Amino acid sequence: MSSHATTTNFFVDELEKLRKLHPSVSIIYADYYGAATEIFVSPYQFGIEDPLVACCGVEGPYGVSITTKCGHGEYKMCDNPQKYASWDGLHPTETSYKAIADGLLRGSYTQPPIATTKNSCSKLTKFVSSAEYKVLYDM
């Protein structure tokens, strides 16, 4: 078992104890790391061509440099940021954030799943595009 899985199991067990102590409270474990890792395990599932290459950066295998940062000096921009997981070698792209959010909101990276939690937003499982996420903020 990986150290991540061991840590996750520990937190889930501890949260279960808290749930028993506070039955009227919804306590949800969110595995952000697991959801983010999915991008690197199955990049094509999210439309990402190479999850290790930065969209904005420099020449080279990953587009990242210690001396040249995106927006400063001699940098280059990709043509289609939606096909990249990393914006600048440090920050995720919108595509990555959407994949992580989907994994947390609709996937298996929360315990219990958010969509099945009492009093969760019933529209959550109906979201299909990022345009529909705006509706949630307008409520």
Image (cartoon, grey):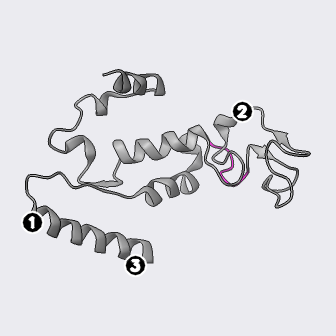
Q: Earlier in the sequence, mark 1 or mark 3?
A: 3
Q: Amino acid at mark 1?
A: Leu
Magenta segment: 47-53
Where is residue 121 shown, x and y percent of the image?
24, 33
Residue 81 placement: quadrant:
top right
Q: Amino acid at mark 3?
A: Met
Of badges 1 and 3, the one in the foreground is 1
51 in magenta: yes
Where is residue 32 shown, x and y percent of the image?
43, 56
Q: What residue is shown with label 1?
A: 21
Residue at 85% x, 45% y is 72
Q: What residue is shown with label 3?
A: 1
Where is residue 73 shown, x and y percent of the image?
90, 46
Quadrant where the N terminus is found in the figure? bottom left
> In this rendering, would 39 be left or right of 61?
left
Q: What residue is shown with label 2?
A: 80
Q: Amino acid at mark 2?
A: Asn
